[in-house]
Amino acid sequence: MFKQKTVLMIPGPTPVPESALIELAKHPLPHRSKEFSEIFVKCNEDLKYIAKTEHAIPLIFCASGTGAMEAALVNVLNPGDKVLAVVNGVFGKRWADMAKKFGGEVIKIEPQIGKAVKAEQVEDAIKANPDAKILLTTFSETSTGIRNPIDKIAKLTKHTDIIFCVDAISGLSAMPVHMDEWGIDVLVAGSQKGFMIPPGLSFIWASKKAVEASKQCKNPRYYWDWDLAIKALESDTTAFTPNVSFICALAETLKLMKEEGIENSWKRHDLLKRLTRRSVEAMGLKLLTSEEDASASITAIIPPDNIQVKDIRASLKDNWKIIVADGQKEFQGKIFRMGHLGFVFERDILMALSCLAQSLESLGFHVKSDWQKAYSDVLKNK
Amino acid sequence: MFKQKTVLMIPGPTPVPESALIELAKHPLPHRSKEFSEIFVKCNEDLKYIAKTEHAIPLIFCASGTGAMEAALVNVLNPGDKVLAVVNGVFGKRWADMAKKFGGEVIKIEPQIGKAVKAEQVEDAIKANPDAKILLTTFSETSTGIRNPIDKIAKLTKHTDIIFCVDAISGLSAMPVHMDEWGIDVLVAGSQKGFMIPPGLSFIWASKKAVEASKQCKNPRYYWDWDLAIKALESDTTAFTPNVSFICALAETLKLMKEEGIENSWKRHDLLKRLTRRSVEAMGLKLLTSEEDASASITAIIPPDNIQVKDIRASLKDNWKIIVADGQKEFQGKIFRMGHLGFVFERDILMALSCLAQSLESLGFHVKSDWQKAYSDVLKNK
């Protein structure tokens, strides 16, 4: 089977629509041209729509997601600041480590393995640390497929001085985010997830409260400096050379996202999640997380006894050209992860599940045929 | 005339070969796949060839050039360190400003306006500041078209503890760089210049001396951390999600660069520089820099009396779809800059000069017809 037939069902890069790939193939525009500025300004407007904000300022960085995570921290974190960090996976840990590197006194809030944090745990941590300045939370923890309840957490910080920072890299557009209404202060996202373009851009939305905090922030910064970025926005441009090709592709996928409507995108991803979860369970497999705790971007699946994750992944890759992800760190070999984020629809899930069933059978696991009924039941009642 | 016929003769983005654009249009590979790792490893090998180094470690950052300039500084600069910075334009000033932001005690070496720095000036500065830890120099100062003599400067630092950092963003591949032989410690470059792909990647080559210095460096860092990047190289990968699409396009342009041969690339750019300079002078225009001080990437041209830079640029753009750059900061409106970097050949220069001659005539300037003979004389004696 041709290499070109490969389907990525990993948590990113996600599938890229043809019209965005075609944008990438066009010759780059001069970055200081009027033509490019118009595209850039449109992207910023559309980014506000995606995050449901009117008041926050969207900033586009030429960097991958970790870059924007750093750009969030170094603008609001003063060395010595107390930082509360929800850690329930690789990416939560990365942000906590990073905060420590930049001088934060980091206090981790660590839910039970495989579980979302409870708002009460965060509330307790805030009460125990009334001098906390920053709260870091991962929205969709890609490493385990967990969704943390950022809506409930935001209520705890909204009327305080705490800067609530959300890494929504793999969650935005898949699940509801109401930045203004909830009171998120710093939202972070990346291009290769719900935005449906390859990795290369990342985004920050900074609330007024966050921008005010950044003005007092002493952490040295230049490439990530919000102040330089915001000043450049006044001239409809970026502080430093932008990735013009990716921004043109982003303009295209934002157009597609607006055509679908963000609420419909949330609904679609919720459906994809339920289709995946119910079918996989009906096959006779177990899931890592409860439905309530599960992200709509990715599903973490526990392999059947006596079948190795690496064999499932190899079978899906070699026979069906479908790429799914292994677990990370302590979950390596314990789970496999199937992404259903971005340019993914019901048909893709049915295809991937059908191939998974074939692969599992070929590895000696008896797949219960009930799964197809489970799939269609979810679809009927969507 | 179709928009698609536009030719960029700006200092970046530079023209992109079709085969690289086609790479960008391909669906992204999973970044942790064997297939991508092989391409990534090949790029790193080829990057060593381009910088004429066997001992330095090349690092690819998902960021534009300013990001790599920051990644150079924060790995070798300790707060309080004395930094000597050659400043003869916008980009030299940017690096000096950045060093100050990150805690450096910056001492500027400022040549006369429009002139390259002299090695003697740098030598004097080193003698006057025996405690200097870092020396920053721009190789090709894009804002003015100046080439600084990094070969001679390197001799001054090679056998000292000073870390010699060169911003070669717009100069690499256009003019000789022998990183190992000369003794450059940190070399910086960007994708949208001699590498012939759009802006989105930047590069650092770190010498052993620089890597040793980075191990002692206390400046906090994460996204730019060489240590994390070098550790990831051991597994043929990157510390954070790379721009897979751009790295695949880079693999393609590096292949083209190796086919030409880096020495031939230097010769070609030197020819393009002489073709441009001699022809423009023969037209009756003046150049900002002397031939000795001039970069082979870009030529800064002084407009005729009574003709505005903005009118020349508008005429070239509106009538001929050729984009040239204005001057920056104090040179805005005083010079226009014609890039001849990367995927540019003799025919492109002849075309651009012919259009320039037509534009100047239409603006009321009598172009001396001698310029065509000047052009062919250079070409004959190349």
Image (cartoon, coloured by chain):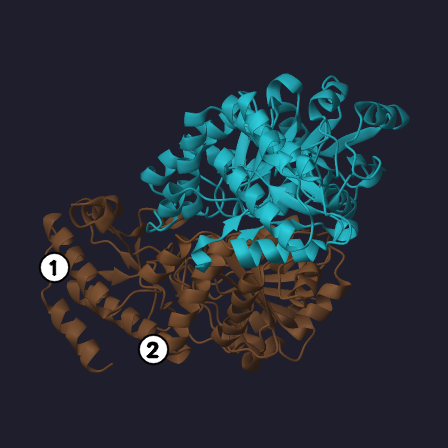
Chain colours: A cyan, B brown
Residue B309 in the image: above or below residue A346 = below
Residue at left offset 66%, top offset 45%: A337
Q: Residues within 10 Å of mark 1 (few under 14, many from 20)?
A: some
Closer to the observer: label 2 or label 1? 2
B59 or A24: which is nearer to us? A24
B324 or B243: which is nearer to us? B243
Residue at left offset 56%, top offset 38%: A341
Q: Which residue is mark 1?
A: B367
Q: Secondary structure at mark 1?
A: loop
Q: Are marks 2 and 1 in contact (CB under 8 Å)?
A: no
Q: Chain of mark 2?
A: B
Q: Secondary structure at mark 2?
A: helix
Q: Which residue is mark 2?
A: B267
Which amino acid type corresponds to the residue marked 1 in the rendered image? Val
Which amino acid type corresponds to the residue marked 2 in the rendered image? Lys
B66 or B43: which is nearer to us? B43
